[in-house]
Image: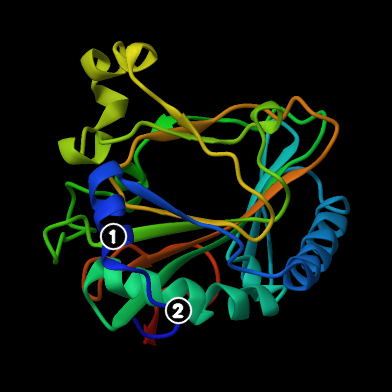
Amino acid sequence: MKKNEISIEQIKEFNETGFLILRELFSSQEINDIKESFDLLWDISKTLNKTTNEINGAHFVFDKGDLNRIVWCGAVESKLLGYARDERITKPVSQLLGSNKLNQIINQAHFKMPGQKVAFKWHQDSEHRRYGTEMWKDINGEGSYVQTILAIDEMLPENGPLMCIPNSHKHGHLDLQNNSGWMSKIEEMDKVELVMQPGDLVLFGPYTVHSSQVNQSNSPRRILINGFAYPGANSRVYPGAGQGVEIEI
């Protein structure tokens, strides 16, 4: 197995459950470096008027007065793009997509700070990629997209961790916004609460059903999200500077 590659067993786990966690991928020193960027972004957000603002190609998105996310955060803090394109992330993504070229379309800093009401309902990322429209083509027949989430803080039961429904990806695009039948059964389904430490990375495909609740702790729960498409799959123009950059592994 070459440097930064994942094993055949890990690929099988991803394909079977719909997600894969890589533990201790980044060091505490690297995470502290990323935290410095998140702190700077947070400080900038406090100067804004709590509506969506664009700064140098990064979009600061607010929801009900709370900072929800920063879209293409690397436009303000470029080192976050450097970490996003580190081969410890891009090599496994390349293996899972089956392509040595990737289009990066997502680079987001997400904040769940104490006292905020930020939460994300059950959804598939295929909804946001515009599956079923002319904006997306499933080139590789397996979704043509991999999302990665890097834990910046501990992700614990009390601070709104990511929750996934194992095997849900096997149903393909469910159009959950218009699928009341499937949504009515979600509470009865088995779920996995992803407990992660700073430096851990989770990867999942576009069909994996997932959500996260409000942070009810006294500590931050921040994550760095990066998403990569199979070349030619995406034709949607995303907000943010530099989206759609092709990366060769």
Count residues near mark 2 (Cα–Cα under 10 Å), then give few for <14, some for 14-19, many for 20+: some
In this rendered view, identify the residue nearer to me: 20 or 143.
20
Q: Position of residue 120 (x, y in %)?
A: 53, 32
Q: Is residue 38 left or right of residue 125?
A: right
Q: Residue 110 placed where, x, y %?
A: 64, 50
Residue at screen point 33% across, 18% down: 189
Question: Residue at the location (59% across, 27% down)?
Answer: 213
Most foreground residue, 146 or 193: 193
**134 sits left or right of 27 in the view:** left
Foreground: disc 2 or disc 1? 1
Pointer 2 and pointer 1: residues touching (CB < 8 Å)? no
Give x and y (percent) for residue 88. 50, 75
The percent position of residue 181, horizontal first and vertical second, equals 22, 13
Q: Amino acid at mark 2?
A: Asn
Q: Which mark is residue 4?
A: 2
User: Looking at the figure, which quarter contains the C terminus?
Assistant: bottom left
Q: Is residue 160 above or below residue 98?
A: above
Q: Can you tell which mark lies on residue 109?
A: none
Q: Residues within 10 Å of mark 1 (few under 14, many from 20)?
A: few
- Any mark on residue 9, and which? 1
Gap between marks 2 and 1 measured at Cα: 15 Å
Q: Amino acid at mark 1?
A: Glu
Residue located 24% across and 55% down the image? 12
Tell me if I can see residue 145 in this picture: no
> Residue 7 or 83: which is nearer the viewer?
7
- Identify the secondary structure beneath mark 1: helix
Quarter-wise, where is residue 17 in the image? top left
Q: Is residue 127 visible?
A: yes
Reply above or below: 153 against 212.
below
The quadrant where residue 59 appears: bottom right
Reading the chain from its start, which is encountered first: label 2 or label 1? Answer: 2
